[in-house]
Structure formats: C-alpha cells, structure tokens
Amino acid sequence: MVRFAVPPVSPSGPAFNSGSVSVVAVIPARYQSSRLPGKALADIAGRPMIEHVYRRTAAARSVGVVIVATDDERICDAVEAFGGRAQLTSSKHLSGTDRLAEVAAGLTCDVVVNVQGDEPLIEPSVIDDAIAPFRTDSGLQMTTVRRRIENDADLHNPNVTKVVVDRDGYALYFSRAPIPYTREGCPPAPAWRHIGLYVYRRECLLRLTALPPTAMEQAEALEQLRAIEHGIRIKAIETAYDFIGVDTPEDLARVRLLARSPVALGRS
C-alpha cells in the first residue's frame, strides 16, 4: 500500500545512533533536469515531491537526521518551509554522489545514506534493510538494493540497470545490458534490477568521490562501477518493493494518480 503521509520531519540534532552506528540520510536534489525541470518542487497531493521523499526517509527507524543537499535556493526554501533541513552545495558537482560527499565531509556520523530526490514512494523499511548490515559487519563499506526482474522488457531496457551478484549478495557487475546472458537450452539465471539507494561508510564515500572516473563507469554511464573497479565491495540487499522514480512527465502523472486515493495519502 502506498502511503504518502508519514511521521513528522526528522529532528535537526546530532546523528541518530542505530545499534552503535550513527546514521545520516542525505537527499541530493537538483532543480535542473533535462526531461522534467523543477521536478523536486513538482506538486504531488498538495506537497512538493522533495517533501514526500524527505518525510518517508525520516520515517526509516535507523535514520535520525535527514538533510537535503541542493545547489538551488528554491529547493532550500521549500524544504525549510515544511520544517526540514537543507544545505546549499556547490553548483559545479557532476553527480549527486559528489553533492552527497560535500555534505558528508562536514558530518561526524559513521554511515551516510544516499536517497534519490525523485523517489516520492521510497519505502522506509527498505532504507532500514540497507542500513542493517552495518550494525553487524564492521568491515562493510557500501550497500545498495536489488529487486527481481520479472519481465523481458525490463531485462532488455537500457534505462533499467541490472546487477549480477555472488553467492553472498555482493555485486559483481552493474550494466545497462541484459545480464546475465542465458545460453540456449539452459535454465535462465535470476536477473536483478538495481535500485539506486546507497549506504556508505562515511570514509568510503569520501574516498570513492576522490577517485578518478573509470573506463567501465564511463562506458556504461553508471558511477557505482567506479567502486567495483577500485575494489570496493557493494552488498546488494534484496527487496520485493517496487520503486517508482520520477524522471519524466509520464512518471509524475503516474505518481499523482496514485496520490488521488485517500487510502494512499493516509488521510480520512
């Protein structure tokens, strides 16, 4: 069930300690978008999209502080208007991860969560699931999320990123191509869709963004491959939840349609 209304905005105090791991969630948000300019402020059920993302992130039990990282004062103003916390960042960043790292450099937490600013339906429990392994594995550097691909259209769609994992759930490779390839006569191997939610040890995030882009990263246009090529292991947590990112006007219309239901809004 989709629920748009969630508990109050996260406090602006020190990082929450989740089982001996302090956690801050950062939501990179840009105003400019080639396919949907200003989407962070797009109205969904009477609230800007960034507010839905913020409140749902704040509803994750493992997260105590949520910060929107943006280079646009309009987004800052909108976040502050609903009582959230925002930080203006450089306008020169080439990726949301670089924007995330600028904020992380000023934090003292153990773990930083990267929540995409165009995921108004993000499920809070999935954020908790991606954070959970950091409580028990002191050597873990980075996690992300994967979901089973159930149709050929998604498998062959270059806009759907695929991930292949080892027996322990660590990512071996990410690609826009349909991987793994299934030879004729062989039963198909599981195919996984990569969901762009990331959790990092703070030091790992700062080190990763200081590394130069890599060949596979540039060929696939997938920045997580930089971690793979530099030997940083990424644990990909399985989820059954479907994610609806807002990249196009059609995506926005779909989310707005879902938001019309009183049940979806969590209102009477």
Image: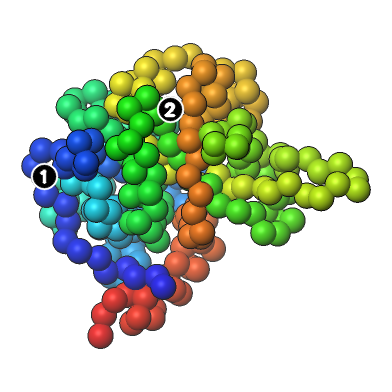
Q: Name the foreground residue: 66 vs 33.
A: 66
Q: Residue at x 27, y 54 (%)?
A: 60
Q: Estimate how packed mark 1 is, as few (under 14), some (14 to 19) or many (20 or more) residues with alpha carbons within 10 Å.
A: few
Q: Looking at the picture, which amino acid does disc 2 mark? A: Leu
Horizontal side, residue 14 vs residue 41: left or right: left
Query: Which mark is drawn over residue 94?
Result: 2
Q: Residue at x 78, y 49 (%)?
A: 188
Q: Residue at x 29, y 58 (%)?
A: 56
Residue 262 seen from this side: yes
Q: Is residue 214 above or below residue 45?
A: above
Q: Is residue 69 above or below residue 77?
A: above
Secondary structure type for disc 1: loop
Location of residue 23 in the rendering, given as x and y in whole percent from the top left corner: 23, 38
Q: What residue sits right under mark 1 in the picture?
A: 12
Horizontal side, residue 105 vs residue 265: left or right: left
Q: Looking at the picture, which amino acid does disc 1 mark? A: Ser
Quarter of the image where the N terminus is located: bottom left
Q: Earlier in the sequence, mark 1 or mark 2?
A: 1
Location of residue 13 in the rendering, given as x and y in whole percent from the top left corner: 8, 42
The residue at the far right in this view is 185
The label nearer to you, 1 versus 2, is 1
